[in-house]
Image (spheres, grey):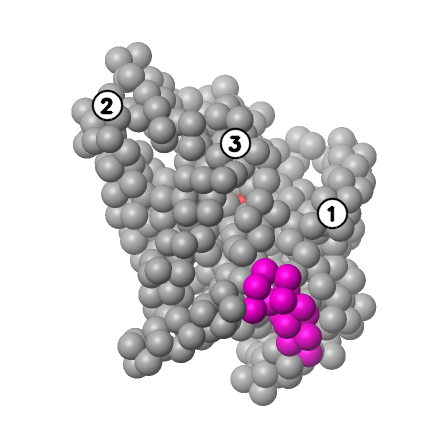
Amino acid sequence: MKKVFLASIFSLTLIGLTACGGGEEADSENGSASEGEDTASENGNDSNGEASYTIEAGIGLNNEHPQYEGLLEFKDIVEEETDGDIHVETYHSGQLGDDREMMEALQLNTQEVTIPSTAPMANFVEEFTVFDFPFLFPNEQVADKVLDGEIGDRLLDKLEEEEMVGLAYWENGFRDLTNSQHPVETAEDFNGLTLRTMENDLHLDAFEELGANPTPMAFGELFTAMQQGTVDGQENPLATIYLEGFYEVQDYYSDTHHVYSPFVFLMSKQFYDSLPDEYQTIVKDAAVEAGEFQREQNRKANEELLGSLEEEGMEITEVSDEARSEMAEIVQPVIDQYAEDIGTDFVDEVYEAVEEAEESVE
Ligand code: TK8
C-alpha cells in the first residue's frame, strides 16, 4: 500500500505547486468550495433547525453526475421518512475533500456520509481490490448480482473494523481510456502514455504492465493535471468523462471497458451507531433504494453520452474483443499476484459467483 501513498503525496505537492495560479479556474470549472457560500440554499442544506440529526454527505463528482442525483434521492427519502428529523446536507465536486480524505473524516466522525470508488477503499480493506480486477465483470447485470449478493455483503461487513458502515453498492461504471496523444486501439498503444490512476496499487501495476507510465492522483487534481499536460490521459466511465468536461483537455476516447468500478455508500460507524434502530433501517433502505435509482440514471447517461463526446470533437476508438483479450492476458500476472495477496480462496469464490451470476442473467 505504501507505494501509492508516497507517490500521491509527491503528485499532490507537484499539483499544489502548479495549481496555485490555476486555482480560480479549476474551482470555477469544478464548482468546489469557493462557491460554498451560496451552496447552502442551492443544495438544500439550510437546516430548519428542528432536526435531531444532521448528515453531511460529500462526493467527489460534480452536481450534474448521476452520483449526485442519487444523493439527492437519498436526501429526499430520509427527510421524508423521518419528517425532517434527520437533515441531509449534500456537497459535490470534492467540496469536502477527495475519496480518501472523506473516508478518513468518516473514521473520525467529522463527516457522516461519502460514496467513494472501491479502488481507494482497498487502502482501508484490501479485499476490495478484487472488485477492481480488470475484466472481472462482463456486464452491469452480473456486477449487480455479485455486489448485492453474499460476496458483496461480506466485504461491506469488513468495513466496521475501519469505523465505517457500508450501506449499499452504487455504480461508477465501466472505465474507458482518454488521452491527448494518439488513438488507443491495442495494448501496444498504451506504451509511453503518462496516465493518471486512482490511488490503488493494482491499477498502478496493471498500467505499468501494459507499458504506460501511471501516476496515482486524487480525482480533484485530475482536470488541472490534464490541462497542464502533467499527465497525457486517464480512465473513467463515459458519464464522468463527459459531465466533468474532460473533452476540453482530451482528444482521444477508447471504450476499453477494462474495469467495472462500483461505488460504495459509506456512513460513519459512530454516527450510524448513534441512531435509533428505526433510523438505522431508514438510512439503510434509503441507500439501497437511491442506489437502484442511481444505477438506472448512470446507465442511461452512459448510453446517451457517446454521441455528445463526438460532438465535442473527441475521436472515438472502438476497441475490439481481441484487443481486450490481449490486454487481459498482459495484466493476468498482476491479477495473480494480487489474488495471492488478498487470498486465492476468496478470489476463487468471487470468480465462481461471477460465473453463477452470468448463467443466471443469460
Ligand atoms: C470521484 C472518484 C471518481 C473515480 C476516480 O470521487 O477517482 O477516477 O472514478 O469517480 O470516485
Residue 275 appears at what percent x and percent y?
30, 26
The reply to whether the magenta stretch includes residue 340 is: yes
Q: Residues within 10 Å of mark 2 (few under 14, many from 20)?
A: many
What is the CA distance from the residue labelled 1 to the residue labelled 3?
20 Å
Q: Secondary structure at mark 2?
A: loop
Apparent side of residue 248 relative to residue 41 in the rendered image (left or right): right
Residue that badge 1 annotates: 2
Q: Quadrant of residue 328?
A: bottom right
Q: Secondary structure at mark 3?
A: helix
In this view, the residue in front, 340 or 63, is 340
Earlier-in-chain disc, 2 versus 1: 1
Q: What residue is drawn where x is 76% and y is 50%? A: 3
The mark closer to the camera, 2 or 3, is 3
Q: Is residue 62 visible?
A: no
Residue 220 appears at what percent x and percent y?
62, 41
Q: What residue is drawn where x is 54% and y is 56%? A: 127
Residue 272 lies, with reference to residue 141, above or below; the image says: above
Mark 1 touching mark 3, by CB under 8 A? no
Residue that badge 2 annotates: 84
Residue that badge 3 annotates: 107
- Magenta stretch: give its range: 330-344
Apparent side of residue 97 relative to residue 87 in the rendered image (left or right): right
Residue 141 appears at what percent x and percent y?
34, 68
Apparent side of residue 80 relative to residue 219 in the rendered image (left or right): left
Q: Secondary structure at mark 1?
A: helix
